[in-house]
Amino acid sequence: MSSSEPSSRPSRLETPLKPGAGASSSRTTIEAVLWIARTGSPWRDLPEAFGKWFTVYTRFWRWAQKGVWERIFKALCEDPDFEYVLIDGTLVRVHQHGTGAKGGLKIRP
């Protein structure tokens, strides 16, 4: 979610999700949650650029209780953007006689 790139997505995901909170605050929360998911770090290790970790966690938890995350995921699934999809086409060549494994499990007493 780069803020420098124009998005073709509908702006409904950027509308405030909490009364009194602006779209940038909601976006920051979403980016913070994605950072946590991507790094696997505990909430307390959230960088200060995202705000106080407890505030972000509280908002995440409230959104989860209200079904906000489910609505976001459904909206993203309805209109997938495959612009950044990467496919790994690695090819490994093997000698023609090297395609099989040795037959049977051999256990030595």
Image (cartoon, rainbow, N blue to C red):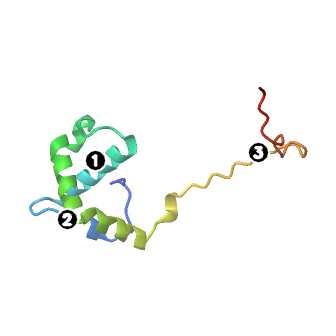
Q: Position of residue 59 (x, y in %)?
A: 18, 53
SS at badge 1: helix
Drawn side of residue 38 relative to residue 93, left or right: left
* Quadrant assignment, res 51: top left
| Residues at marks 1 and 3, CA–CA distance in whole angstroms | 39 Å
Question: Residue reaching furthest top?
Answer: 109
- Which residue does the image show at 27% across and 70% down from the upper left? 12
- Which residue in the structure is indicated by mark 1? 32
Q: Residue furthest bottom?
A: 78
Residue type at mark 2: give it.
Lys
Tell me where residue 63 appears, x and y as whole percent.
21, 60
Determine the CA span between mark 2 and mark 1.
Answer: 19 Å
Q: Examine the rendering and report whether any part of residue 53 can be seen.
A: yes
Q: Quarter holding the N terminus?
A: bottom left
Q: Say what amino acid the circle numbered 3 marks.
A: Val
Q: Which residue is located at x 61 percent, y 55 percent?
A: 87
Name the mark nearer the viewer: 3 or 2: 2
Up-down relation of residue 50 to residue 79 (above or below) = above
Q: Residue tagged by mark 3? A: 92
**Residue 8: quadrant of the picture:** bottom left
Residue at screen point 29% across, 49% down: 33
Give residue 66's mark. Answer: 2
Q: Residue furthest front?
A: 109
